[in-house]
């Protein structure tokens, strides 16, 4: 089952999550070279704060700030019912 | 006291993160009509994270929550009431709805939207309800419920506008006029705002950032008003009388009080 949140509009990102046996994080971004590591850190920190160790996350970024990446991922997690807090 | 209340859709990061550059005195982040029902949860999470991160950079923030009958109402309030916001704008207002919100909103300001004939008739009781700091007129829904067409000339809005302005003045709360929806019609916007101010409205809601400058200018005291107010206060202090003459006109306490309010507004807006 895939769950999504966000959009492909400017300053937003589209997060797709699906169940996985491992943790897989894929990032597609027009600013990947400059901010790829930052996006990865936001996603990792957010997953850690929800105690999630197994999930496939696809982040299609359109220049989102960190609070937006975090928000869209949290929304997707909530929608999936995977919040282990 | 604000002159302009700019609506910003609650689920649009590119608008949310720029709200401090729009120069509106207040911003209304919208969880209601501009957010699709399937994305209400996303808007709440986005605004929570935004305000937790940027609360020091943003000023006078209100949230238009969903109405009390909507399944999102309680989550809208519970997920935001501890954030750095001034209060809530409540659609489909009634006395009962305002009281319901007041009980759960931690004493934050409430601005009910008067957008039905029944709410207009109840507006005095709504204005007197706990937590209410202003009334916002919602002309689109009001005209829809009346079964009448809303026109740019707005003659059909004269009665509800006048009623709301009088009620707000009587209860010493802000009277916030309905947005002008033709966002590219600058002349129409100015005429509409001047007409509202003339009826007693103290502010106007807006739907587009390009309307902010005109609204801030119109709802601020003009240089002529400020100069006259200064003259009245100066003469009042010099004469030490309850009533005196200035330029051949009698000046008494109500006019002196009005002059003080003009100077208070001018000071607030740095004029």
Image (spheres, grey):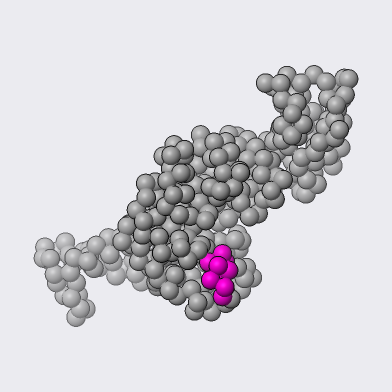
The quadrant of the picture occupied by the C terminus of chain B is: bottom left
Location of residue A1 with respect to A30 vertically, above or below: above
Comparing A17 with B19, the one in front is A17
In the displayed structure image, the side of residue B132 where residue B10 appears, left or right: right
Quarter residue B223 falls in: bottom left
Q: Which contiguous range is marked in magenta? A: B140-148
Q: Residue at x 84, y 42 (%)?
A: A30
Q: Residue at x 14, y 64 (%)?
A: B238
**Magenta span includes B160:** no
Residue B51 location in percent, x, y?
Answer: 58, 38
Quarter residue A13 falls in: top right
**Magenta span includes B143:** yes
In the displayed structure image, the side of residue B47 where residue A83 appears, left or right: right
Residue B175 location in percent, x, y?
Answer: 41, 61
Location of residue B7 with respect to A33 vertically, above or below: below
Can residue B4 be seen at all in this image of the molecule? no
Q: Which SS type dominates the magenta stretch?
A: helix
The quadrant of the picture occupied by the N terminus of chain B is: bottom left
In the displayed structure image, the side of residue B131 where residue B182 appears, left or right: right
Q: Residue at x 19, y 80 (%)?
A: B248
Residue A72 location in percent, x, y?
Answer: 73, 37
Comparing B178 with A43, the one in front is B178
Location of residue B230 with respect to A19 vertically, above or below: below
Comparing A58 with A66, the one in front is A58
């Amino acid at each position: 089952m895939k769950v999504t949140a966000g959009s492909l509009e400017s300053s937003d990102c589209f997060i797709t999550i699906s169940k996985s046996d491992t943790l897989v994080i894929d990032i597609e971004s027009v600013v990947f070279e400059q901010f790829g590591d930052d996006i990865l850190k936001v996603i990792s920190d957010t997953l850690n704060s929800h105690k999630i160790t197994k999930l496939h996350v696809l982040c299609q970024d359109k220049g989102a700030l960190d609070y937006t990446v975090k928000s869209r991922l949290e929304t997707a997690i909530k929608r999936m019912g995977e919040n282990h807090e | 006291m604000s002159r302009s209340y700019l609506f910003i859709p609650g689920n649009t990061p590119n608008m949310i993160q720029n709200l401090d550059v729009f120069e509106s005195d207040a911003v209304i982040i919208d969880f209601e009509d501009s957010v699709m029902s399937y994305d209400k949860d996303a808007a709440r999470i986005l605004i929570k994270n935004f305000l937790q991160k940027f609360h020091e950079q943003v000023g006078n923030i209100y949230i238009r929550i969903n109405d009390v009958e909507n399944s999102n109402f309680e989550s809208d309030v519970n997920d935001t009431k501890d954030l750095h916001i001034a209060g809530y704008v409540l659609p489909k207002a009634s006395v009962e709805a305002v009281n319901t919100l007041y009980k759960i909103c931690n004493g934050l300001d409430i601005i009910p939207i008067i957008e039905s004939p029944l709410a207009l008739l109840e507006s005095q009781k709504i204005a007197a309800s706990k937590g209410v700091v202003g009334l916002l007129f919602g002309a689109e829904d009001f005209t829809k419920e009346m079964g009448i067409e809303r026109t740019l000339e707005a003659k059909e809005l004269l009665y509800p506008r006048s009623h709301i302005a009088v009620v707000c003045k009587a209860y010493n709360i802000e009277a916030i006029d309905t947005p002008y929806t033709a966002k590219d019609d600058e002349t129409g916007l100015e005429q509409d705002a001047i007409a509202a101010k003339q009826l007693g409205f103290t502010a106007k809601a807006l739907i587009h950032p390009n309307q902010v400058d005109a609204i801030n200018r119109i709802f601020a005291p003009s240089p002529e008003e400020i100069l006259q107010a200064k003259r009245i206060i100066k003469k009042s202090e010099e004469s030490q009388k309850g009533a005196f003459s200035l330029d051949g006109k009698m000046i008494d306490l109500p006019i002196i009080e009005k002059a003080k309010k003009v100077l208070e507004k001018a000071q607030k807006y740095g004029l």
